[in-house]
Amino acid sequence: MKYLVMVQGTQADYDAMRGKPSARSPAWTEAQLKAMYLYMGAISDDLAESGELVDAQGLAEPARTRLVTRGKDGETVIADGPYGETEQLVAGYWVVDCASLERVTEIAERVTRCPGPEGLTEYPVVIRPIMDGAGDIGAE
């Protein structure tokens, strides 16, 4: 079964990676950033080697996000970032094809051990099954 494994972050987290700390996000050193990228890259490499990796990407900061919604009058409303520090968005993801929920949970648990600066806000890693078709709606 295919799963989407998502890591989350805020604009403050992206700013901290560029050396601009906030109350919620300590500044990252160059060595810490390198360690984080190497760690995440190793996960992707291992998943590619096992044949479980379908896709993996880091996403641009929330400040580069655009929301498109319908207003009360039915007109399109377009809003560009940045968003508040507390708004968590998907920061990156893996699409994996795994034998079981237990296996993808092992992968997510490994992601939670990613290195970073002391005091870093730890967000949950979200696992979502990818539906194969309309028959998956409501399936357990």
Image: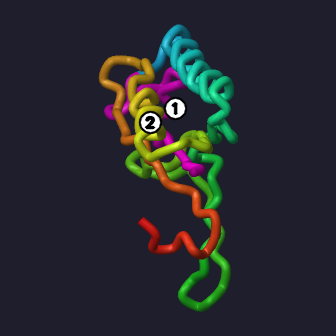
Q: Residue under circle 2?
A: 108
Q: Secondary structure at mark 2?
A: helix
Viewed as shown, does residue 106 lie left or right of 68? left
Q: Position of residue 34 (x, y in %)?
A: 57, 13
Residue beneath the point at 58% across and 57% down: 130
Viewed as shown, does residue 52 lie left or right of 102? right
Q: Dividing the picture into quarters, in which one does residue 58 lie?
A: top right
Asked whether the viewer can see residue 105, the reply is yes
Q: Position of residue 80 (x, y in %)?
A: 63, 58
Q: Position of residue 24 (x, y in %)?
A: 34, 34
Residue beneath the point at 47% across and 27% down: 16
Amino acid type, callout 2: Ala
User: Furthest residue to the top?
Assistant: 31
Q: Dividing the picture into quarters, in which one does residue 93 lie?
A: top right
State yes or no: residue 21 in magenta. yes
Mark 2 Cα shell of 10 Å, populated few (<14), some (14-19), many (≥20): some
Q: Position of residue 123 (x, y in %)?
A: 37, 39
**Badge number at residue 15:** 1
Front of the two marks 1 and 2: 2
Q: Secondary structure at mark 1?
A: helix
Amino acid type, callout 1: Asp
State yes or no: residue 25 in magenta. yes
**Badge number at residue 48:** none
User: Furthest residue to the bottom?
Assistant: 73
Viewed as shown, does residue 55 lie left or right of 86? right
Residue beneath the point at 41% across and 65% down: 140
User: The magenta stretch spans which residues?
Assistant: 1-26
Examine the rendered structure and indicate whether residue 125 appears above or below residue 47.
below
Examine the rendered structure and indicate whether residue 7 appears above or below residue 4.
above
Q: Nearer the viewer, residue 86 or 57?
A: 57
Q: Nearer the viewer, residue 29 or 110?
A: 110
Find the distance from the CA under tag 1 to the CA under tag 2: 24 Å
